[in-house]
Image: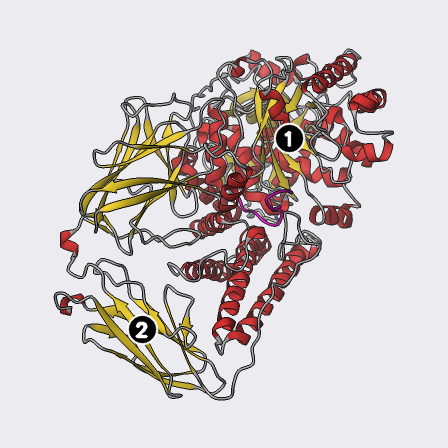
Amino acid sequence: MSHLPLRRSRRPVPLRHALACAALAVCSMLTASPALALGERPVVRFDAAPGALTLARDGSAARLVVDDGEDPAVKHAAASLQDDIARVSGARPALLSAVPAAAAAHVAGQADLVLVGTLGSNPLIDRLAREGRIDVSTLRGKWEGYLIQVVRDPLPGVAQALVIAGSDRRGTVYGMYTLSEQIGVSPWHWWADVPPARHPVLAVEPGARVQDAPVVQYRGIFLNDEAPALSGFAKDTFGGFNHRFYEKVFELILRLRGNYLWPAMWGNAFYDDDPANGRLAQDMGIVMGTSHHEPLMRAHAEWAKYGKGPWDYSKNEKVLREFWQQGLERSHDFEKVITIGMRGDGDEPMSEESNVALLQRIVADQRTLIAADAAKPTLDTASRSGGKAAPQMWALYKEVQDYYEKGMRVPDDVLLLWCDDNWGNIRRLPTAEERKRAGGAGIYYHFDYVGGPRSYKWINVTPLPKVWEQMHLAATYGADRLWIVNVGDLKPMEVPIEFFLSYAWNPQAWPAERLPDFLKLWATREFGPAHAGAIAALVASYARFNGRRKPEQLEPGTFSIEHYREAERVGLEWQALADRARALAPQLPAAQRDAYFELVQYPVEAANTLNQLYLTVQRNRLHAAQGRADTNALAARARALFAEDAGLARQYEAAAGGKWKHMMAQTHIGYTSWKDPATNVMPQVAEIALPAQAALGVAVEGSTAAFPAAPALALPAFEPLAKGPRFIEVFNRGQAPLRFTARPDQPWITLDATQGTVAQAQRIAVDVDWARVPAGATTAQVTITGADGGKAVVELPLRHAALRAKDAHGFVETGGVVAIEAEHYARALAPAGRTWLRVPGFGATLSGMTTLPSDGPAATLLDAMRLEYEVWLTEPGKVKVEATLAPTLKFRPGPGFRYAVSFDDEAPVVIDVHADASNRHWEKMVSDGVARFTSEHAVSSPGRHTLKFWALDPALVLERLVIDGGGLQPSYLGPPESARLP
């Protein structure tokens, strides 16, 4: 295959050269592959094609050659590649430290070699480069670049060899792990029990050449909030957070092409808990750091163990300096990024008395300590990237960002780590001037958090489109030196972790329109192509549903049981998802079912169970108030769901032979504040005593009132253009079966049941035959009569009875509202150089519409971009337009971000989405996962109108628009999308 040319980023740094679409196109020409490096050019095939280089065949394998002088990280990865080839083919390659003699190179079945080495430290690789057998002109000097190339006649007596060359030690490591992934070994083979498919033949395409290097320099994860799940697992499995545990973590990070770790720190201390931890990180090629509030390579837990006096620099400077200096001395020979600055004790804000001047003095003193340590000789040159001292990072977390905004500065060589709000919304990005700083900028992001408004620690709640949208902004605004994400216990966050690190490797490889392909490629790699589409849809859907409201924030009443059938629709969505996940499991090979349960089935079923629990409790409480006969059955069902939640956790921990003990120990039911409860708490349910005799009860759609307590009942108005029938629910209030009849008073009212016998409840679908409705009709009635003598009359109001579909156009108003998904515009208008972008799968309902470029200047109404929607309103007068947007924060200094709304040719109403800077507003929008804003307008006439949404500032993401003509009812997600007529 010909080499694909490298693209270059702004820095410039070579980008991943092959998009996943190229991978799919090439894959179609090869023998089907169960696993590909996501977004990477495939070069491995599983048949003995003419001229292909053989990695394994007929029980023999090519030999791996790794020079004795190579870095330990390269040797460790080579041993992994050796194991991986054996896992897939059954043939274990020999691992040699030198090229075999020409005569030995022709051993049967072992003619081909894999030559592994790092430019500048491997004589053989350097020789091949000098002779022009490999072209390293675009690789040399790159950060973590690698080259995989089939070379003809590289050495005397060797017909061809596969060369894996790195620009540095980690580049060589990534080249080997890329090959491992392409032969079928998932990065998650240990952490998620993904088994590789067996292939007796492993070969590399003749002439294959792959070259790559990352965009974001430091790409890592933070193990945090790790008790009780990960800490219990680590202790039970490894004896604690020791080098045996971290070996598994380090390998995972490297297989995912990450390079950076903030270690577990809830009562844990990486260097102190096991002195072998630091050396292992160095030997495997991991760059170590400490969290945003742990300066100079000391874990906070060490202060509790060794510290003397207060954690207060103004009162305890000498002791703190000694404490920090010891951290530098201990990590002196290790590659690292050093956190500087200081927060209060226990990751809390510093006292009010602390000020910018004190923090500046702290930073200056810390840098003095760092400079003194860097001046000392090192035993390991790999610990000094490019011969330079370790980079320094200042995390602008929470109130520390306020210090920066008030004028505090650090030297230009210090990396500024901007942070999200702990809920996935970036608080600040570099300005054009700040992008000139030598130290660059990075992002600290969250998939897990402990704190207000509520902790979320249990399972994955972060949809990939949300990660993409925020990290796309980070890449666009130049915050691309270091990306670190809080992953909690690691295990439940496999999918977003991989996407985060893949996107960090090369943001341009994954544009918004290719987001669905990422999950499909991921599912293909883990489970094969047969069910990849279905699995990808399951993962995308459960993450989206969890992202609407985090599981820890759910409660009875989150979703409206009264309006838009919302609670019912949510329950049906979740149940359908769980049914699909459960049905797919037995269709997979038995060897894949543990991985499927961990990665797909458990998060789907567990989240469904939790949602059904709260929805059932919600119904139980309402039905108890209405005196329904099914009240106690619903209480029993809720208890069964509570027990099912615990059963699913046990099933998870029993997977893979009981490997994951403690991993689902995180509580998630019964929150009453931000802090997780000590144990899961069953929600309170109601039980009632029922009379022996049957008794009539009647409820209607759109109301929680019920007969006989509410003698007058009315359904929401029927309209010719409204979707579907309404319902009346006949329920029993006694133990004996209830017989009933239902009679409309007009022949044009249709019922799907006019009589019945119910033990608990029966729904009756009510509709209108509009062709038979006489002119001037405004209402009808349905009378429900029970055998007990009870009689309920339900009013059926009609609205706009004369309107027909042929009269209307666009999205039509029904129920006093028009609801529109943002992507369903009639026209998208933008001036030259700007464009609208659809982000598929974004947000709570369908997708998001945003603008490019994301760093463009603010616009005026004269040059603003806009989306136009054709709507049909039934009445003139005042209306409100509710815009649902992503909860984008004001990440640029200056005024708030703005949009505008108008109808037809009226003057647009401008809305500043950041006008309300209160904590209450922030808590609501991060809890809801969206931000809603309302503008008021006057419509002069009924009929056809054009609704316009104007984007005045970049980076806003519109999810949906709702026109409220006076009928909008309270709900969590809003009304379903309105009918759209041609």
Figure quadrant of residue 704: bottom left
Residue sitting nearer the eye, 959 or 314: 314
- Against 611, residue 166 (above or below) is above
Q: Which residue position is annotated with label 2?
A: 794
Q: Which residue position is annotated with label 1?
A: 64
**Residue at x-position 45% and y-position 21%:** 6
Circle 2: residue type = Val
Q: Is residue 32 visible?
A: no
Q: Position of residue 575 (x, y in %)?
A: 47, 61
Q: Main secondary structure of the magenta part?
A: loop
Looking at the image, residue 877 sits to the left or right of residue 393; the answer is left
**Residue at x-position 53% and y-position 29%:** 505
Looking at the image, residue 672 sits to the left or right of residue 714; the answer is right
Q: Position of residue 634 (x, y in %)?
A: 53, 72
Residue sitting nearer the eye, 852 or 636: 636
Looking at the image, residue 692 sits to the left or right of residue 834; the answer is right
Residue sitting nearer the eye, 298 or 804: 804
Residue sitting nearer the eye, 671 or 540: 671
Circle 1: residue type = Leu
Q: Position of residue 65 (x, y in %)?
A: 65, 27
Q: What stretch is highlighted in magenta?
A: 451-462
- Against 132, residue 90 (above or below) is below
Q: Of helix, strand and loop, which one carries label 2?
A: strand
Figure quadrant of residue 298: top right
